């Protein structure tokens, strides 16, 4: 039995499907099983990563688990996992842990602390360290639908965003194959793309003419802090500023682990075309 935490999230839902398709027995931990909307065949149980009693029950009969990070609050799960004798934990971490600059930022420190907690627990581990998710572009949908415009700062800032389906596919292989224990994978998409380039690709996929409108960093910060913590926003804007006018390295880990190429941004956009209207 494999336990998936964060099973209703962008990675978790895809991971559940990957594991079911591989014939695995899957249990999903969620705060509200009635609203989970997971496929038939999944053992959906109520629980929370900070609730020791619910974790003991959820881990009964489980051999491996996918751990979605609740930063600084993983100890209850790790204690329960140790008592349950788990053979492996696959932790969703972040590329920020090993990035020269982001490792000193809050997001890097939090994810590094999560990794250290898992190592200290003694439970065999695999770490997934994705860079920016392609799904992070879904907030562009409102402007695309209403005006055909994406507004942001640092339009020429490059990243190599990764499809959430690819993160899930790597997680599935890590949970199903013993050879991944003790390894950490940096996960990116197959292309270094600026924001302007991603808007162009999105427009081509949708069959619409979209345009990118450059915002000042101050205007972008005001928008972003409506939905994100100010410290996180400032860290992201510093990252975009560093990566303006550059290209970024691309990892082959998705293909190395899964045996198939990582999804391109165009493929991701086609998969989410309905979200953009």
Image (tube, rainbow, N blue to C red):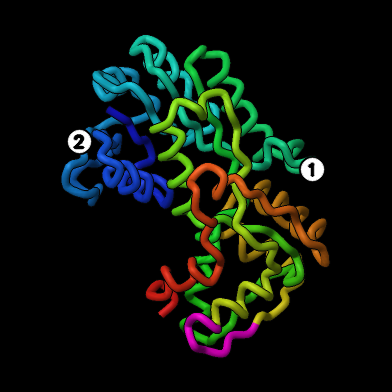
Of tags 1 and 2, the one toward the viewer is 2
Q: Nearer the viewer, residue 63 or 46?
A: 63
Asked if residue 16 lies left or right of residue 11, the reply is left
Residue 256, position as x, y percentages in the image: 57, 45
- Please provide percent x and percent y for residue 97: 68, 36
Residue at 66 percent of width and 58 percent of height: 160
Disc with the residue nearer the chain's start (1 vs 2): 2
Dot 1: few (<14), some (14–19), or many (≥20) neighbours within 10 Å?
some
Q: Is residue 93 above or below residue 201?
A: above
Secondary-structure class at tag 2: strand
> Mark 2 sits on what residue?
43
- Quadrant of residue 63 in the image? top left
Q: Kindly identify the residue that appears in the image at 27 percent across and 36 percent down.
A: 24
Residue with the mark numbered 1: 101
Q: Residue at x 50, y 32 (%)?
A: 91
Bounds of the magenta segment: 204-211
Q: Position of residue 167 (x, y in %)?
A: 49, 47
Which structural element holds mark 1? loop
72 lies above or below 86:
below
Q: Residue furthest front?
A: 259
Residue 173 vs 274, above or below: the answer is above
Choose top left, top right, bottom left or bottom right for residue 78: top left
Residue 195 image point, x, y percent: 67, 70
| Residue 210 belongs to the span the image colors magenta | yes
Please, is residue 20 above or below residue 69 in the view?
below
């Amino acid at each position: 039995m494999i336990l998936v935490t964060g099973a209703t999230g962008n990675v978790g839902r895809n991971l559940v499907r990957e594991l079911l398709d591989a014939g695995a027995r899957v249990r999903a931990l969620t705060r509200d099983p009635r609203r989970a909307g997971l496929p038939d065949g999944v053992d959906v149980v109520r629980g929370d990563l900070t609730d020791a009693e619910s974790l003991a029950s959820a881990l009964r009969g489980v051999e491996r688990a996918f751990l979605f990070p609740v930063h600084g609050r993983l100890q209850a799960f790790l204690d329960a996992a140790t008592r349950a004798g788990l053979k492996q934990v696959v932790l969703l971490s972040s590329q920020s842990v090993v990035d020269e600059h982001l490792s000193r930022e809050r997001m890097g420190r939090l994810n590094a602390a999560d990794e250290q907690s898992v190592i200290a627990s003694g439970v065999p581990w695999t770490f997934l360290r994705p860079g920016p998710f392609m799904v992070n572009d879904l907030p562009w949908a409102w402007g695309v639908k209403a005006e055909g415009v994406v507004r942001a700062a640092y339009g020429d800032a490059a990243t190599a965003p990764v499809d959430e389906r690819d993160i899930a596919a790597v997680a599935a292989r890590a949970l199903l194959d013993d050879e991944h224990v003790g390894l950490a994978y940096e996960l990116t998409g197959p292309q270094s793309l600026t924001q302007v380039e991603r808007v162009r690709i999105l427009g081509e996929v949708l069959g619409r003419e979209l345009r990118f409108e450059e915002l000042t960093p101050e205007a972008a910060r005001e928008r972003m802090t409506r939905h994100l913590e100010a410290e996180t926003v400032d860290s992201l804007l510093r990252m975009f500023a560093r990566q303006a006018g550059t290209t970024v390295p691309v990892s082959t880990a998705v293909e190395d682990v899964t045996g198939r190429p990582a999804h391109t941004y165009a493929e991701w956009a086609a998969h989410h075309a309905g979200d953009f209207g």
